[in-house]
Image (cartoon, grey):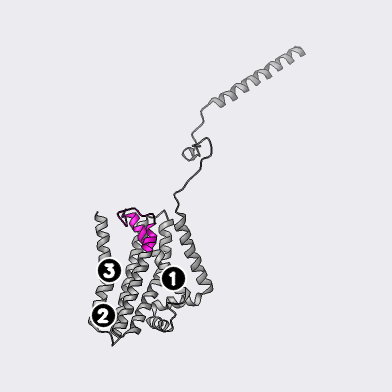
Amino acid sequence: IIMPHKIKSDTSTTAASLKVDTVIVLKGAVKEPLSPSLFQNHLLVPQHKYPQLHVTKYDYVISSILLLLVVFFVWLYAFDFKALTQVIKDFFSFRNSSKNNREGAATKNRTTIFLALFFVITLALLIGKILESYNVKLFSFNIPVPNEIIIAFIIIAAYTIKFVIIKLTGLLFKIQNEADDYINTIISYCSVLGLFMLPIVILMFFFKQVSPLIFIYTGIGLFGIFLLIRTLSGIVLGYNSSRIAKFYLFVYLCALEILPFIIIIKLIMLKLNN
C-alpha cells in the first residue's frame, strides 16, 4: 500500500527530474555547432559602422549631351517625320538629293541642322574615346577644355573649309550645280551617319559588360563604309557631268578626299608609337 503523500512526493520528484533533464537537453542542443549555411559566401557583411557617402566616377556632361540628342531625335520623329524621312531617302537616292539641293532644302531646314549636330557630336565623342582608350594626348600641353569640344570644333572647321573649296572650285570651273550637288551629297551622308552613330556611342559609354573597343571598331568601320559610299557617289557625279574633266576629278579626289585621311592615319600611328 502506497500512502497518498508518498505518491505526491514521487510525482513531484519525477516532474522535477523531467524538467531538469529537459533543460539540460535544451541547453546542450544550443551548444551544439550549427551546420554551415549554403549562403555563407553570399551574406551581406557590414563594412562601416556608420553610413558612408558613395561617390561614383560618372560623367554627367556626356550623359546630358547624349540624352539631349535622344530628345532631339524623338522630337524630329514626332513632329518632323516627313523631313526626317526625306533626308534618309536622299541617302539612298541621288536624284532626290539633287532635287532637294536645287530647292535649297538640304542646307536650310532644321532637320538637316539637327542631324549635322548629331554627326559632329557623335564623331567627336568617338574620337575622344579612341584617344582615351589608347592613352593618346591631343596636345603635348594641358588645356583646361575637354578633348571632345576641341575635336568638335576641328570637325566643323574641316568641313567648312571643305565646302568653301568645293564652292570656289565650282565658281572657277563654272560647275556650280555639280558643286552644290556634291555638297548636298556630303551633308546627306553625314546626317544619316550621325543617326547610325548615335546608338553605337550610347552603348560605348553605358554598356559596361562589353569592352568599349568593340564599339570603337564598329564605329570606325561604319565611318569607313559611309566614307567609301560618299566617295563613290562623288565619282559617279563627276563622271555623269560632261562639264567636269576627268583629270580634275582625279586631282580633287586625291587632294581633298584621300590625302587628308592618309595624313590623319599617319598622325594617329605616330601618336600610338610614341
Q: Amino acid at mark 3?
A: Pro
Q: Nearer the viewer, mark 1 or mark 3?
A: 3
The extreme bottom residue here reads 242
Quarter of the image containing the N terminus?
Answer: top right
Q: Which residue is mark 1?
A: 115
What label sits on residue 87 in the rendered view?
none
Q: Residues within 10 Å of mark 1 (few under 14, many from 20)?
A: many
> Label 3's element?
helix
In magenta, the rendered stretch is 124-152
Q: Position of residue 180 (x, y in %)?
A: 36, 81
Q: Residues within 10 Å of mark 3 (few under 14, many from 20)?
A: few
Where, by quadrant of the figure, is residue 107 drawn?
Answer: bottom left
What label sits on residue 260 in the rendered view?
3
> Label 2's element?
helix
Residue 195 in sight = no
Residue 34 in sight = yes
Residue drawn where x is 33% and y is 61% of the image: 217
State if disc 1 and disc 2 touch (CB < 8 Å): no
The extreme right residue here reads 4
CA–CA distance in space, label 3 to label 2: 16 Å
Q: Position of residue 131 (x, y in %)?
A: 33, 57
Q: Position of residue 210 (x, y in %)?
A: 39, 55
Q: Which residue is mark 2?
A: 249
